[in-house]
Image: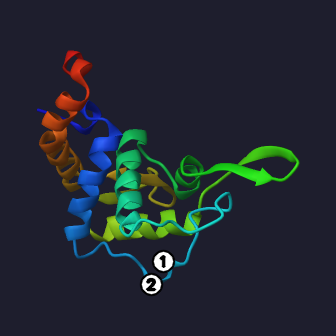
């Protein structure tokens, strides 16, 4: 069986974004067309479906990195901030975008919160069985394209 580890992210994320766009629980907020994706960016994104692409990338990262929180995910989507003549420094991406996307993924049943043993503290978000099934089914659909685009991939 093909898993999401077997397919490169550049082929998996757009196909997964199409699946998420069909989900009625995941929708682009009204403010999404005006917001920047981080303080290191100068302009908002120009793609029409950037919200679904970002949600798909967040879903893949949650699946890959295990219990992961909003802060760590925003650092994953960060980049170098231009500070003029001073050297660039790393800055995190927008936590609001990550948090809202995680909440929508949680409402749709693809992601859930992992609690500590006492049930008093959230350790981060993890993938549910429904989310794993979605990722693996999309990876299985994309696998022939991946084999054609990357000929040496079937060795791994």
Q: Residue at x 13, y 40 (%)?
A: 140
Residue 115 visible in the snapshot: no
Number of numbered callouts drawn: 2
Residue placed most toward the observer, 120 or 139 = 139
Residue sitting nearer the eye, 80 or 102: 80
Which x, y percent locates residue 130?
19, 55
Residue 97 drawn at (x, y percent):
51, 67
Residue at figure coordinates x 23%, y 61% from the top left: 18
Tell me if 115 is positioned left or right of 7 in this view: right
- Can you identify the residue that label 1 sits on? 33
Q: CA distance from mark 2 to mark 1?
A: 7 Å
Secondary structure beneath disc 2?
helix
Residue 129, image x, y percentages: 21, 51
Q: Which mark is residue 102?
A: none
- Residue at the image position 47 percent from the left and 53 percent from the top: 124
Please determine whether, in this image, residue 43 is positioned above or below residue 63.
below
Quadrant including the N terminus = top left
Q: Say which quarter of the image contains residue 105.
A: bottom left
Q: Is residue 122 left or right of residue 129?
A: right
The residue where tag 2 is placed is 30
Is the Cβ of the residue at disc 2 closer than 8 Å to that at disc 1?
yes
Report the mark closest to the observer, 2 or 1. 1
Q: Residues within 10 Å of mark 2 (few under 14, many from 20)?
A: few
Image vertical order of residue 25 relative to residue 128, above or below: below
Q: Which percent across, then down, holds residue 65?
A: 43, 40
Q: Nearer the viewer, residue 114 or 84?
A: 84
């Amino acid at each position: 069986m093909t898993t999401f580890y077997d397919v490169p992210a550049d082929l998996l994320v757009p196909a997964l974004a199409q699946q998420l766009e069909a989900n009625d629980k995941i929708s682009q907020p009204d403010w999404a067309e005006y917001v920047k994706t981080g303080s290191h960016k100068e302009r908002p994104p120009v793609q029409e479906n950037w919200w679904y692409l970002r949600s798909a990338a967040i879903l893949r990262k949650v699946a890959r990195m295990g219990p992961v929180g909003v802060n760590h995910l925003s650092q994953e989507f960060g980049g170098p901030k231009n500070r003029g003549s001073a050297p660039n420094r790393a800055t995190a991406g927008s936590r609001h975008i990550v948090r809202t996307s995680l909440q929508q993924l949680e409402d749709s049943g693809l992601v859930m919160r992992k609690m500590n043993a006492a049930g008093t503290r959230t350790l981060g978000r993890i993938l549910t069985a429904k989310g794993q099934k979605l990722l693996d089914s999309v990876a299985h659909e994309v696998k022939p394209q991946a084999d054609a685009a990357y000929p040496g991939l079937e060795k791994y």
